[in-house]
Amino acid sequence: MENLNKRKPYLIASAILVLLAGIFFVYHSIVYRTEISEFDLKASVADAAGITPDSHFILKTTAPLSTQVLEKYFKMMPANDLSIKKVSAQENTFEIIPKDELQANQIYTIAVDKGPLASHDFSWAYQVKAPFQITSSVPADRGVDAPTNTGIELYFNRDNIIAPESFIEITPAVSGRFDVAENKVRFIPNNPLAERTIYTIKIKAGL
């Protein structure tokens, strides 16, 4: 009896350890449970020029997977750790947030390989926008011998430029109108341009 009393604390401790191990096993088996799923991934904000450096992504799954198991199997290349959070208002919907800001003018791929979560490889590629800029113009920059009846076309690395007349200044002043089509802004003068004249185009901040 005395020996039993001495061993009692050890028996209680052993029972607690077994109970904790069982709880951990059940927790681990639930949280890290894998199941074959389909996936749909979209950037939170994107246009024809790409995504922004602070973009995050919305992932939808067909299987009820945990954030822990998604973080284990989803990868971004070039390497960038991913934080995945459940979107509480929607079933099987998650927000994927890169831990480091994405680099401008870089292509990133998010992927999950064929395996415990997928019957085949899934991957999505996203181009991070380059800084806002003019990519080309007609007439060309510093061009000479442009015809006096020419219009002026500016091509940007963004679509749907808004209110160009408020931000594009032509010197000497020329009356006319602006048209916008996708990434092109065209200025159509009301009258022919003056001969032997250098025209300067200035883009104001805020365009």
Image (tube, rainbow, N blue to C red):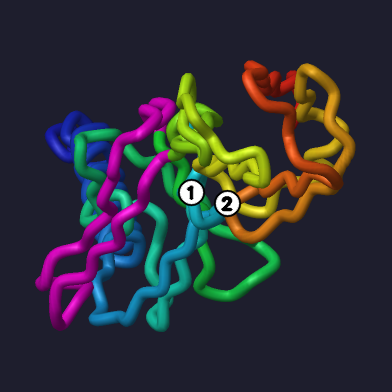
Q: How many labels, in total?
A: 2
Helix, strand or loop at label 2? It is loop
Tell me if I can see residue 9 in this picture: yes
Along the line of sight, which residue is nearer the eye, 65 or 44? 44
Main SS class of the magenta portion in the image = loop
Percent coordinates x, y for residue 41 in the rendering: 42, 66
Along the line of sight, which residue is nearer the eye, 121 or 107? 107
Dot 1: within a 10 Å radius of its alpha carbon, few (fewer than 14), some, or many (20 or more) residues?
some
Could you tell me which residue is drawn at 64 percent across and 41 percent down? 152
Could you tell me which residue is drawn at 27 percent across and 61 percent down? 32
Instruction: Judge depth for marks 1 and 2 and give the one in front.
Output: 2
Q: Considering only vertical position in the picture, is 16 above or below 134?
A: below
Residue type at the position of mark 1: Ala
Q: Which residues are magenta?
A: 99-128
Percent coordinates x, y for residue 85 in the rendering: 51, 50
For residue 121, which numbered disc appears in the image?
A: none
**Residue at image mark 2:** 183
Q: Quadrant of the C terminus?
A: top right
Could you tell me which residue is drawn at 20 percent across and 37 percent down? 78
**Residue at image mark 1:** 49
Could you tell me which residue is drawn at 36 percent across and 28 percent down? 103
Answer whether labels 1 and 2 touch (C-beta < 8 Å): yes
Percent coordinates x, y for residue 198 in the rendering: 63, 16
Percent coordinates x, y for residue 199 in the rendering: 67, 21
Q: Quadrant of the N terminus?
A: top left
Magenta stretch holds residue 123: yes
Along the line of sight, which residue is nearer the eye, 19 or 27? 27
Using the rendered view, name the quadrant where residue 64 is placed: bottom left
Helix, strand or loop at label 1? It is loop
- Which label's residue is closer to the chain start, 1 or 2? 1
Q: Is residue 142 left or right of residue 197?
A: left
Along the line of sight, which residue is nearer the eye, 152 or 164? 152
